[in-house]
């Protein structure tokens, strides 16, 4: 099953796919351009993985200042970082290198505490697509992403659909790709994750309680390149969805920031 959350005609609606666009819970059918797409589920804690694909780790190897360790590289994001399908993301003026990251997002379906890896998949409600932008100018350390790089307002697009776990028998065999203005710039497969979904759930639940709606962004493969204002960025994961986002400048938000 696929489901979405949208705003339409002054109200919030649950929705499902329809040949003409999407069907709201009250039966109305609307085109996807007629609605404002929201994150497709009530989001709890946002847990993000860095350097979780072997090819992306190799891609950045010359820039790393600390060697990787066995434990996953994990950081948290606030709810303000999220924007839905067909939303816009700000590219601050003056930055030299801002890039997309196509990621499989794993949504937790029930309380998970000290879960064993062998049992972990039973705690997954489903999956969606995320595009977790980063501004490399702001990195204090190429190994540990800092707050200004990764926890930016509206800099993580997510959606459009929550795809139930039963429709994705194996989340580790999914081709994924990114297109910028219609051209493929990133391709990979979830088969290349270093830390797979069950291992991540075991690791995280060993020291923090995971709750329904918590989401794990599982990292991105190689192929991240700079994007600019006006670019349309599409992140796709086979069997999960096609997420559209557009980059806009400071003037849309009426603010600027110092670049150092």
Image (tube, rainbow, N blue to C red):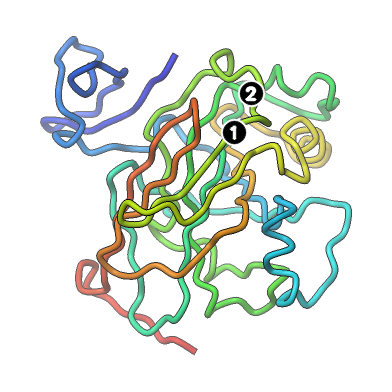
Q: Within 10 angstroms of label 1, few (less than 14), some, or many (20 or more) residues?
A: many
In this rendering, would 233 be left or right of 166? left
Residue sticking out furthest to the top: 27
Residue at 30% x, 19% y is 17
Up/down of 89 relative to 242, above or below:
below
Please identify the residue farthest to the front as the structure is shown: 183
Disc 1 vs disc 2: Cβ atoms closer than 8 Å? yes
Q: Residue furthest right?
A: 70
Q: Distance between the residues labelled 1 and 2?
A: 7 Å
Where residue 152 appears, x then y in whole percent? 45, 63
Residue at the outermost left position:
9
What residue sits right under mark 2 in the picture?
124
Q: SS of the residue at dot 1?
A: strand
Which residue is nearer to you in this view: 89 or 243? Answer: 243
- The residue tagged 1 is 106
x, y percent for residue 86? 28, 45
Q: Quadrant of residue 77?
A: bottom right
Q: In x, y percent, where is residue 67?
A: 85, 69
Judged left or right of residue 90, residue 50 is right
Q: Residue at x 55, y 24 (%)?
A: 126
Q: In this view, does 30 lie to the left or right of 210?
A: left
- Is residue 141 toward the left or the right of residue 148 in the image? right
Closer to the camera in the image, 222 or 122 = 222
* Residue at the spot 27% in from the left edge and 31% down from the top edge: 6
């Amino acid at each position: 099953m696929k489901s979405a959350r949208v705003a339409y005609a002054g109200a919030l609606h649950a929705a499902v796919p329809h040949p003409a666009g999407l069907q709201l819970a009250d039966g109305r059918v609307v085109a996807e351009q007629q609605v404002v797409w929201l994150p497709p589920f009530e989001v709890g804690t946002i847990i993000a993985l860095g350097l979780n694909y072997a090819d992306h780790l190799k891609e950045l190897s010359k820039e790393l200042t600390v060697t990787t360790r066995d434990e996953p590289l994990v950081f948290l994001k606030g709810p303000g970082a999220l924007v839905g399908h067909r939303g816009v993301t700000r590219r601050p003026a003056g930055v030299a290198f801002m890039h997309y990251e196509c990621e499989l997002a794993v949504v937790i379906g029930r309380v998970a505490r000290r879960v064993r890896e062998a049992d972990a998949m039973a705690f997954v409600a489903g999956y969606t697509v995320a595009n977790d932008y980063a501004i490399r100018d702001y990195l204090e350390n190429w190994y540990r992403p800092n707050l200004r790089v990764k926890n930016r307002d509206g800099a993580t697009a997510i959606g459009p659909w929550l795809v139930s776990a039963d429709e994705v028998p194996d989340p580790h065999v999914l081709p994924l790709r990114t297109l910028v203005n219609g051209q493929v710039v990133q391709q990979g497969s979830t088969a290349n994750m270093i830390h797979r979904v069950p291992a991540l759930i075991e690791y995280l639940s060993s020291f923090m309680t995971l709750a329904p709606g918590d989401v794990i962004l599982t990292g991105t493969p190689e192929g991240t390149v700079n994007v600019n204002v006006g670019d349309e960025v599409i992140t796709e994961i086979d069997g999960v969805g096609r997420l559209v986002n557009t980059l806009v400048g400071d003037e849309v938000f009426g603010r600027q920031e110092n670049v150092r």
